Amino acid sequence: MPVSKLVIGENIVISSLAAYRLQLSLGEWDWGCLLFNKGAAPIHFKEAPGLVINDKALLIHGADIEDDFEKLLVYINIDNKKPNQTINAQLTELLSGSITASMQFSNDELPQSAFVLLELYRHKEQLKLRCIGQGFAQGISKLFASYGVTEASVHKEAMSSTSAKSVTVSNTQLDDILVNMHWDTKQSSVHHGANLFVGENFKPMTDLRVGCLYELHNGQRGLVQTIGEDLLGSFHGVPYVEALRSENSHVEQLAINAKYQHKLHRYLIYALMAEGHNNWSALNVEIEFQLAQSQKRCFSPDTLMMKPIYAVAMLEFEQGEITITALNEYFENLPELDQAYGWGLAWRYQNQSENEEQE
């Protein structure tokens, strides 16, 4: 299928059965979305059924979008304009990886300081994507006001989201840290991509595991996870983290021994689909961090992408304090996760490649 290069006012129909990723290339400019549902006031949007914002991308799964959905606007706030900068948007079908549509605006085409780039909307039971290209010379406040949204409410929500990304707590009482993952597929109403090929009665057997990449203050690095007897770790010895699992229920756990926190540096917690990986949203996964002084934080994957590795959060230990930072990134395999965060572990396929080169 040829790629549709959309211009202002042009629209295309997208499949309500497929999952898409709308990737934005904006440089340092800010962006966001306004969601319009029937009979409700527009809201500043981050997540709704079938629609999820992840970094500089919007994930779309038409089968899960609710019936009262009207439209979603993508806007850009150009508060630090730079010469020769462009805005690029690309819509990719996730299952095939094919590019469905793209659009581009140059700096000369963006004289205003706020800009509605595009809209996703429903018309006669079809989902459509339209290139808007409407600018607001009076800035983001005027843009919000024109759609009945106050800037104060948007700023408050954004600040709340930012402040929750990283949290530091004191652990002078040396409370052990527990990471519990549990899931339940029975309550899910998500439409699996596999069902498009083998029917609605197909129920994949999914085996989820939890693990971590660890680094101690002496520089020692490694991996602990609930796959492989030699990778279960040790609670009382190096690396002071042990992986545990329940055979009878969907529960996985990492236990970190805080008595040795003076030796701990950082632990990257991840979850993985060991078998039958499909859509994370279909599994109702929740990963709970029980930190010092009974403080808890919970995370759940929010992607429509079919990538089996979910980077949950980073735990960092420094002078009696623990900092937990949400990551919410997704990867095809563990070496890719390693490379993204610069861990530098030796992976088997890398060693094989090096040996082949030497031969």
Image (cartoon, grey):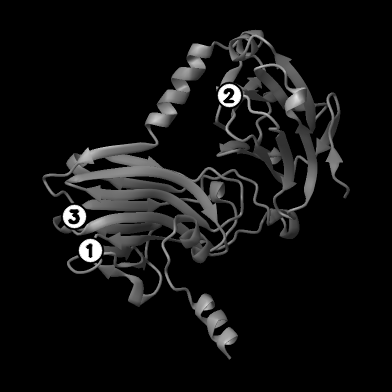
For marks 3 and 2 on the same chain, the one whose residue lies earlier in the sequence: 2
Q: Quadrant of residue 110?
A: top right
Q: Secondary structure at mark 1?
A: loop
Please report contact status of discs 3 and 1: CB closer than 8 Å, yes or no: no
Left or right relative to 292: residue 351: right
Q: Position of residue 280 (x, y in %)?
A: 54, 50
Please report contact status of discs 3 and 2: CB closer than 8 Å, yes or no: no
The circle drawn on residue 153 is none
Left or right relative to 236: residue 63: right
Crowding at mark 2 (Cα within 10 Å: few <14, some 14-19, many 20+): few
Q: Position of residue 263 (x, y in %)?
A: 19, 59
Tell me the CA gap for discs 3 and 1.
Answer: 9 Å
Tell me the CA gap for discs 1 and 2.
Answer: 46 Å
- The amino acid sitting under disc 3 is Gln
For residue 58, above or below residue 237: above
Q: Tell me the residue at 37%/60% (across/down).
A: 212
Residue labelled with disc 1? 240
Q: Position of residue 354 (x, y in %)?
A: 54, 81
